[in-house]
Amino acid sequence: MIEKVAWIRLDEGRLLATLTHGRDRFYLPGGKPEPGETRPQTLVREIREELGLTLDPATVAPLLITDAPAHGKPAGTLVRTTCCTADHTGIPTPCGEIAEVVYLTHGDRPRASATTGEVLDRLAATGQLLRW
């Protein structure tokens, strides 16, 4: 099981997602914790590295947890993602490994990783996400 933490950012019914250089699916911004790092610390670091944004650590709050097949890994490899919300300052800008920043609707699900697709499904079911 691969453990990750991701940031959920909705804007006008669309979910912020990223495309990493060399990948063919959109992912939630975030990543794996470094040794000794808490989930909020991981999230703050990853979002700064990937999007150039500053998250307010005091506002990091878990929203949902999802288990899904890890894209591009051997069959049977799962990724458990703790998805969190947090207040931020700045404008999302692709940095480092990130090639593109987009906002997805549920209709974009075929272009998303399994984890991101699961989150799109859950948010659409609650009415928080545009269907198309």
Image (tube, helix red, strand yellow):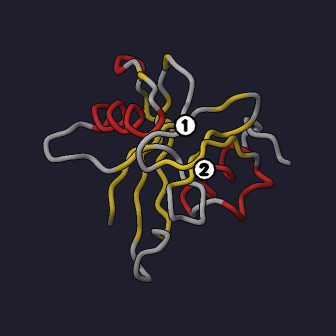
**Eyeballing the image, is 70 above or below 90?**
below
Residue 126: which quarter of the image? top right
- Residue tagged by mark 1? 8
Q: Which quadrant holds the N terminus?
A: bottom left
Earlier residue among tags 2 and 1: 1
Residue found 39% across the figure and 31% down from its top? 48
Instruction: Look at the numbered disc 1 and give the secondary structure of its residue.
Output: loop
Residue 9 horizontal side relative to residue 72, left or right: right
The answer to whether mark 2 and mark 1 are in CB contact below 8 A is yes
Which three-letter amino acid code belongs to the residue tagged 2? Val
Residue 126 or residue 104, whichever sits in front:
104
Q: Indicate the amino acid at tag 1.
A: Ile
Residue at screen point 42% across, 80% down: 76
Q: Which mark is residue 87?
A: none
Q: How crowded is mark 2: few (under 14 residues within 10 Å), some or many (20 or more)?
A: many
Q: Residue at x 35, y 30 (%)?
A: 44
Find the distance from the CA under tag 2 to the CA under tag 1: 9 Å
Looking at the picture, how far across and down is residue 77, in whole percent?
39, 74
Q: Is residue 57 above or below residue 40?
A: above
Q: What element carries label 2?
A: helix
Q: Which residue lies furthest to the left in this view?
A: 36
Q: Which residue is drawn at 15% across and 47% down?
A: 35
Picture coordinates of residue 18 (x, y %)?
56, 47
